[in-house]
Amino acid sequence: MSTVRAPSQADAHRSTLAEACRLLRLPEVTGASQVDTTFLHRRLKAGQRLTSQGEPFEALYVVAEGFFKTFVADETGNQLVLGFPLQGDLVGADGLCNHRHASYAVALTDAEVVVVPFRSIANLGRSLDDFEQLIYRAISRELVTDHALRSLIGTLGAEARVARFLALFAERCGKAGHAAERFTLPMTRQEIGSYLGLTLETVSRAFSALADAGLITVAQREIGLADIEQLRTLQKLHPNAAGRSTGRRAADRPTRRNVTWMDMLGAAA
Amino acid sequence: MSTVRAPSQADAHRSTLAEACRLLRLPEVTGASQVDTTFLHRRLKAGQRLTSQGEPFEALYVVAEGFFKTFVADETGNQLVLGFPLQGDLVGADGLCNHRHASYAVALTDAEVVVVPFRSIANLGRSLDDFEQLIYRAISRELVTDHALRSLIGTLGAEARVARFLALFAERCGKAGHAAERFTLPMTRQEIGSYLGLTLETVSRAFSALADAGLITVAQREIGLADIEQLRTLQKLHPNAAGRSTGRRAADRPTRRNVTWMDMLGAAA
DNA sequence: CGACATTTTGACGCTGGTCAATATTGGTGG
DNA sequence: CCACCAATATTGACCAGCGTCAAAATGTCG
């Protein structure tokens, strides 16, 4: 189904560097075949922790199978969800900074990861010219997606956030080799809410509203996406519920929000 | 005033690797003195762009002097502020991912940066054992601060966000060698609002409220911090206006928000 | 001094948070 | 197999925090 097929089940407990690159969907490191290093895999059951905030950093992980959530817990114990890594995503990069993990990573389903030990990172960087590039790009990608999420949260209303979340999640599932328009959410409404800056009730209501609008089907955690493109570009969903058109004029698009950008963009370089 | 003194004004247009490390406040690369590479500086006037979203990635930058804002602009032109880099901060790391910058960086004041060309990064990584570690840590630090900000935005109310923002900004100014309890904001209310997920009016009101509470003094962009610790730990500021203590009981701390964490944290590793 | 950007303050309303009750699922043990 | 319980999800009612619109004050620059 996918060209990016992680070694599965009992047969393979190791990955070559080339396999790791494919998993990450990043260009293969030149000369990767000349190095004999392979990476151990680690299997996790649903609920198991992969990293813990504050614990010493030993390795980076690349998700090969299954779903995770990453989160930070503040002093009062409340947790804030940072992301839902799945196949091909990097986990643990925040530990490079102080050699101590800055977040928790927990498996939401049975899962498997490729373990890239701290030691290997240093060694390979020395022997393989552009191995470091690989790591740079992987971490940098984290930054980019983080910023995209902040943009999403800072700009859109609740329903649009949830819609985008579903579209993005489906897309990522697709890249991982699963069906994109029908899947089972591995996380709770609470976790989605935390991730999107909403409460679980609001997430639930958003699901219902999107279902009423005919954009998705919802049965607990079984989700079906009817119109992915619409979900991705949705800005607002006020037209109350289904067909009932309350003469809502389509011409209310002031969209005059936070605009000053001309001045700064116009500044000479 | 600060041991971390960037070469200033007309005398120095270059920095050694060791100087760059000090600027970043990261442990000095071993053998840094054995390499003769130096990094060019670049001077910018207020309003000038350092990077542009979509432009090819050529170099990383370390801020040596002055203040920046980084932001992304979505399809409609609205901009979302990602951060306010100042002395010692890394700029441009999101360009490593696709060799194309993913955000804009604009100088808010006259400024100066150390230029670390893409080429140098690859070369130094090859010749200097733990140069790559330096870059890893610098980028990883971005991730960590980003996550901290999301936690802040996701958890706190408007006044607390602004309070924390001021405390954090003051702390960073302090590390850069400036006064921490009295400074001039280099950015507008609008930009602060975008950064914190608020409107400019709400930011302005928050400033007024904090001033009424006696925690800060505000005169346009001239800010004075009266009680930094209180600003840093503030959760809510309902007690209407000034000193009038309305018998505020310290025991109202339900803070029973989003708690399930025991289950997951209790999971065996 | 006049045009413009930024900031402050007020009034009002909507989105989404809060509290609460009920339904559905899944797991456990009798 | 069914009773029971905990966790999760759904839905409703209420209301407050913050966004929106508007106007005036202050600062900035030519």
Image (tube, coloured by chain):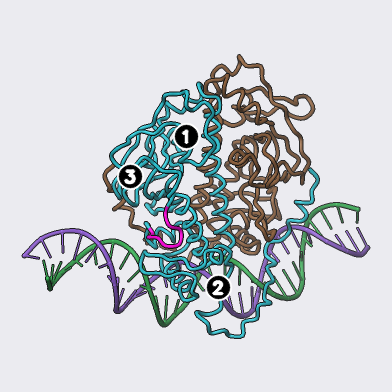
Chain colours: A cyan, B brown, C purple, D green
Which residue was labeled with disc 1? A96
Give the main secondary structure, helix, strand or loop, of the magenta stretch. loop
Q: Which is nearer the N-term, disc 3 or disc 2?
A: 3
Q: Which residue is drawn at 65% across and 36% down?
A: B87
Which residue was labeled with disc 3? A49
- Write down the region rendered in magenta: A178-185
Q: Which is nearer the N-term, disc 3 or disc 1?
A: 3
Question: For this view, does A181 lie left or right of residue B212?
Answer: left
Q: Which picture quadrant has residue B199?
A: bottom right
Q: Which element type, helix, strand or loop, lies under badge 2?
A: loop
Mark toward the viewer: 2 or 1: 2
Q: In this view, does B251 lie above or below A207?
A: above
Q: Are marks 3 and 1 on the same chain?
A: yes
Would you call the spot at circle 1 few (<14 residues within 10 Å), some (14-19), or many (20 or more)? many
Instruction: Tell me which amino acid carries mark 3.
Output: Arg
Alpha-carbon distance for marks 3 and 2?
38 Å
Alpha-carbon distance for marks 2 and 1?
42 Å
Residue A119: x and y in percent read 42, 26
Which residue was labeled with disc 2? A237
Q: Do the residues labelled 3 and 2 touch (CB within 8 Å)?
A: no
User: Is-magenta flag for residue A75?
Assistant: no
Question: For this view, does A44 lie left or right of residue A88?
Answer: left
Residue A25: x and y in percent read 50, 42
Q: Which is nearer the N-term, disc 2 or disc 1?
A: 1
Closer to the camera, B93 or B154? B93
Alpha-carbon distance for marks 3 and 1?
18 Å
Would you call the spot at circle 3 few (<14 residues within 10 Å), some (14-19), or many (20 or more)? many
Q: Which element type, helix, strand or loop, lies under badge 1?
A: loop
